[in-house]
Image: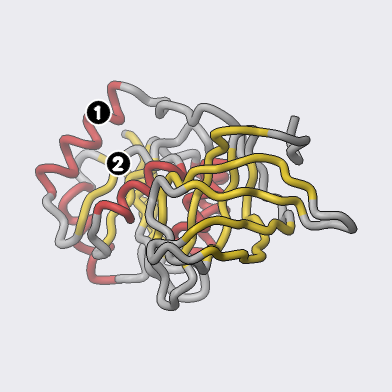
Amino acid sequence: MKKLLLVDDDEALRRLMRLELSDTYEIIDTGEPEQGLALALEHKPDAILLDLRMPKYSGFELLQTFTSLSHTDSVPIIVVSGEGGGQTKAHCKQLGAFDYLEKPIDFEALRTCLSHVGMARKRVPRSEVRVRLHVPLKLKGVDSQGHKFEVSTITENVSLSGFSCTFAAESPVNSIVDVYLIDSADKLVGRARIAHSHPGSTPVRQCGFRFVEKTGPWVLQ
């Protein structure tokens, strides 16, 4: 019997999942997101069902951890969340999610999704590896009001062609910014496009950037 790991702090939902799916799958579940990684490493599930909004640990962080580690990066992760919206879905896909389903759960859609997981055990990998690396950057550009801005930030992860970080300027997706490495003498490393943006509870957003031009050495070569 195939195994499903369910990580969700809603105990009632976990009970419902077991009732609906236990005839087909062995359900391993936890309401403690910090235990999710340990259970995934121990049980090697065929798929992971992951909530986004949980106490103490963000589902986004856990998703990124699952898809960054060699022991779990081949496990398809289906985000099951009450947080709707195209940007949230796109952000999860960018982080490596196999699929995204909104609550309340449509179990027919979930079973269809799981059947696709069964036909293709290994998810489609991301085009390149991301590394958790805190790199101080300065970003310059023009906001949606036509005003020039200059903001400092620190990356959460980097890749050969881009990076993710918090971003305070009001610039829409697809805007272009100049990227500087902050050190003793700020170095222009290129220009990057805002590929996706995830709104937060404050004006500061979580954004993913992809280089459209490199003019200097980046942290990964």
Q: Where is residue 19 in the image (x, y as percent from the top left)?
A: 18, 56
Q: Where is residue 134 in the image (x, y as percent from the top left)?
A: 72, 56
> To which residue does mark 1 refer?
116
Q: Which residue is drawn at 71% across and 41% down?
A: 189
Work out whether residue 43 or residue 32 is closer to the camera in this orientation and state it. 32
In this rendering, is residue 108 above or below 70?
below
Q: Earlier in the sequence, mark 2 or mark 1?
A: 2
**Measured along the vertical axis of the image, is residue 164 above or below residue 9?**
above
Q: How is the image coloured?
A: secondary structure
- For the residue carrying disc 2, how many other residues have a C-alpha within 10 Å: few (<14), some (14-19), or many (20+)? some
- The spot of residue 15 in percent (x, y) is 24, 64
Q: Quadrant of residue 153?
A: bottom right
Q: What residue type is labelled 2?
A: Asp
**Residue pushed farthest top?**
119
Looking at the rendered structure, the kind of residue marked 1 is His
Q: Which residue is drawn at 46% across and 57% down?
A: 60
Residue 36 image offset from top left, x and y in percent: 50, 56
The answer to the question of whether label 2 and label 1 lie on touching residues, with beta carbons closer than 8 A, is: yes
Q: Is residue 186 above or below residue 3?
A: below
Is 149 positioned to the left or the right of 203 in the image? right
Q: Name the residue under label 2.
A: 99
